[in-house]
Image: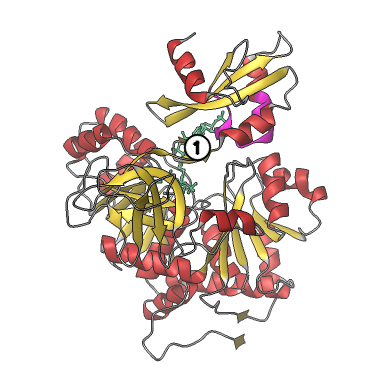
Amino acid sequence: MANDQQQKTDGRMPASVPEAFLERAEQAPEKIALLFDGVGYSYRQLQERSLALAAALHGSGLQPGDRVGLFMDNSPDFVGAYLGTFLAGGVVVPINTQYRQVELEHILSDAGIRVCFTEPRLAPELARVRSGLPSLEAIIETGFLLEGFLAGHGEQRSIMPSGDAIAIIAYTSGTTGRSKGAMLLHRNLISNIQAVCSAWQWSATDHLLLTLPLFHVHGLLVGLNGTLVSGASVELRRHFDAAQVYNALRSEPITMFFGVPTMYTRLLAEAELRTEPPRPIRLYVSGSAPLSPQTFHTFEQVFGQPILERYGMTETGMNLTNPYNGEHRPGSIGMPFPGQEARVVDVRTREPVGPGTVGEIEVRGPHVFAGYWNQPAATAESFTTDGWFHTGDLGFVSDDGYFTITGRAKELIISGGYNIYPREVEEVLQGCPGVAEVAIVGHPDGDLGERVVAAVVRSDPSLTTEAVVAFCRSRLASYKKPREVFFVDALPRNALGKVQKHILSAQLDSGE
Ligand code: MCA
Ligand code: AMP
């Protein structure tokens, strides 16, 4: 077996997540790293599986830097394919399993994905778009096709990626309507997760309950990476189910739970049905969307613990956090993780502003991505010359250093922790027969935080809400579909013809 892994003898820090993971596997091979469907997988087993996948990818002709899609639900195979791609020198492109034709065509072609791992239930979605994707050489379904792929390639060979290599291209929706691939380097990922582990005192004794999808940054770059780098264990679930999570919190040795605010409001609703309180755990973390102070306080009353809120982005991983040992301030996202910086700037002058003044939040540090894949202009626009990244989030910092988000400079709807860019939905619905004009806005929603609402001007008076929703669903991820459709005579526009969404929202609110 030819193995290019560097053996560390000089005590330096690992340069990548796979390097840190292999070290953990050497230190404690029999320790359970992952629990899934009641089955435990040790660090050794994960290591063997990842190396076998790396060997098979090599054997199939994958070259360093080639892109590998992971269009998969949470499972041990996801973890194996993730680490295996890294150890083959490949670049992971995680793909939300709700994505459909429009998103799949764009991501698979834009990233030039060569190999895509998927599930039998999702393979037909890839088959539908495959003819337009000349770079896509192989679709590998989990189950016997994956086992055949592993068996068909013998010699084990792995590459230890350098810190400067691209680890992940993570697609983040954009104001242009087409999502952009954020290039995260191995050194971005390792430095960010080390900062997270240090701030939250994540150690090998922790046991995380993870119900977030692995195809987004919250689940993958925090939940999974943190587990592997700290040598801890994770109980991975296919998806979030409030009753099951409540049961697990009562009966299993969980020390941490990470969720989006919708998960916390659903856990509170679940608690109302129960007589037995959950057991205290070391750490509840919320992120990806604003956690309302009301949810924070009610959760503290019912669960007896304050939630720690933190703030992240696909382009940066985790940016700010409430202090583990200090005050968890409701409504605030806290302060920068160790080794990272944040500031607030005036949106027009771009000059830093003082405490209490609202402006755009900018971040800088070793965690910040290297730019957008094949989009130098978008990359240049996103950074200052001295490396500050414009987050597009508005907020202020208090005298004692706590940041608070007050709004967004970017037009974005966050529904249950998923991001939806109105323009993408508008572009699709513009093609719906019977639609003359359409505008998408977000409305407050008790469960999801915000929900997608469409205002439609009809060219065909017989067009129904159901037809609009069905058209959207067949082309885009189901969570992007409008939950309400209003038919209006005209969209409010300003003198330049731009749709005035604030007026539209007010009209929809008042039911006009
Ligand atoms: C599912 N549906 C949704 C959502 N999720 N609709 C709107 N918003 C949603 N978030 C729709 C489905 O399309 C489906 O519609 C129906 O609801 C039921 O689907 P199901 O899977 O049963 O949904 P659920 O169990 O209710 O899911 C809610 C959820 C889930 C558990 C909150 O959305 C979730 O896991 N959210 C977390 C997303 C996440 O990881 N975000 C982090 C991104 P139909 O039946 O009509 O088809 S990373 C990030 O934001 C940064 C880096 C950060 O700071 O973390
Ligand atoms: P994405 O780029 O898809 O990963 O989404 C990142 C965006 O989610 C950020 O720019 C924020 O708008 C939002 N976000 C993440 N965490 C929080 C939080 N704790 N509070 C409010 N918004 C958040």
SS state under label 1: loop
The answer as to whether callout 1 falls within 8 Å of ligand 2 is: yes
Which residue is most to the bottom? 9
Q: Residue at x 50, y 56 (%)?
A: 315
The residue lying toward the viewer, choosing from 442 and 103, is: 442
User: Is 359 left or right of 63, judged from the image as shown?
Assistant: left
Q: Residue at x 44, y 36 (%)?
A: 416
Image coordinates for residue 107, horizontal then vertical, percent = 67, 50
Q: Is residue 20 above or below residue 486?
A: below
Q: For residue 476: magenta? A: yes
The residue carrying mark 1 is: 412
Image coordinates for residue 156, horizontal then vertical, percent = 63, 80
Q: Is residue 360 above or below residue 187?
A: above
Tell me how the rendering is colored: secondary structure
Q: Residue at x 19, y 52 (%)?
A: 400
Image coordinates for residue 268, horizontal then vertical, percent = 28, 33
User: Is 33 left or right of 421, judged from the image as shown?
Assistant: left
User: Does residue 94 appear anywhere in the picture?
Assistant: no
The residue lying toward the viewer, choosing from 467 and 55, is: 467
Q: For residue 319: magenta? A: no
Which residue is most to the front? 349
Quadrant where the N terminus lies?
A: bottom right
User: Is 3 left or right of 505, judged from the image as shown?
Assistant: right
Question: What's the amino acid at mark 1?
Answer: Leu
- Which residue range is magenta in the image? 470-483
Q: Is residue 205 above or below residue 507?
A: below
